[in-house]
Image (tube, helix red, strand yellow):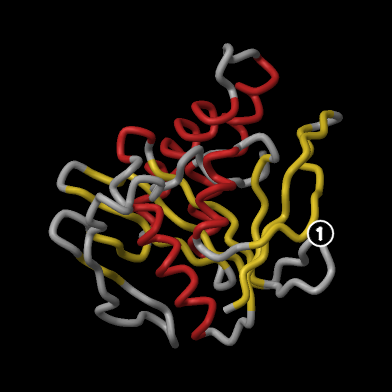
Amino acid sequence: MRSTIACRPGSTARSSRRKRPRSKFVGFARPVRPEASRSDALTIRIARPSDAAILAAISIEVWLGTYIRRGVNAFFADYALSEFTAARFFALLENPKEHIWVSENEDGLDGFIRVSEGQVAPIADCSTTEISTLYVQPRHHGKGIGFQLLKLGLAFARQSGSTSVWLTTNSENAPAIGFYLRQGFEKVGTTDFRIQDQAYRNDVFKRVL
């Protein structure tokens, strides 16, 4: 349950018959930083400080919807409202080691990816580049958004000099696990995500670039 990936993040489970949106990198902001990619109905761009509150709202929606399915109690509500705040995302956007891109449609944002540099993995033989978050609003699953966001994040990591990336996702989040396996990740171990004194088993995945 760490910063983990939403249930079916831009799932491509049915992609054999569904045409993914085309996209291409159209520029770099800072050295080798993909700035934006566009398709017929999909725009991916670098997150801006003005997106901070939206990123917090998407995170709360996706995190609660993915992991808290039987009812929200005070324990998880307190965690979500303290962890996913506009102030926290604003600070991340000001951090040169944190990189966030958003997916935007005509009505607003529907997903984002966060790539973090300088992160020590809980498993040996991993790089220090983590796919910290990949969230897509549930109503936009199946459109290839998660695939396009991940593609951009991997390209950034590769061109920044990383030889691999790692991430964690809840061990019971089968749709997310399936998504990452299809994208070339392999499970390399497990770790625990903690909220206060509670521990939740996470799988650690690695992808060589």
Q: Which residue is painted at 82% across and 63% down in the image?
A: 123
> Mark 1 — residue?
122
Q: Is residue 18 above or below residue 29?
A: above
Q: Is residue 118 left or right of residue 9?
A: right
The local secondary structure at tag 1 comes to loop
Mark 1 nearby-residue class (10 Å; few <14, some 14–19, many ≥20): some
Amino acid at dot 1: Pro
Residue 192 image offset from top left, x and y in percent: 81, 43
In which quadrant will I find the C terminus?
bottom right
Q: Is residue 24 above or below residue 79?
A: below
Q: Which residue is painted at 66% across and 62% down in the image?
A: 186
Residue 14 image offset from top left, x and y in percent: 34, 45
Residue 140 image offset from top left, x and y in percent: 31, 40
Q: Which residue is painted at 55% across and 65% down in the image?
A: 184
Q: Which residue is painted at 72% across and 55% down in the image?
A: 204
Q: Is residue 170 above or below residue 79?
A: below
Q: Is residue 6 left or right of residue 197?
A: left
In which quadrant will I find the N terminus?
top right
Q: Is residue 162 left or right of residue 196?
A: left
The front one of 54 and 169 is 169
The front one of 139 and 195 is 139
The front one of 158 and 110 is 158
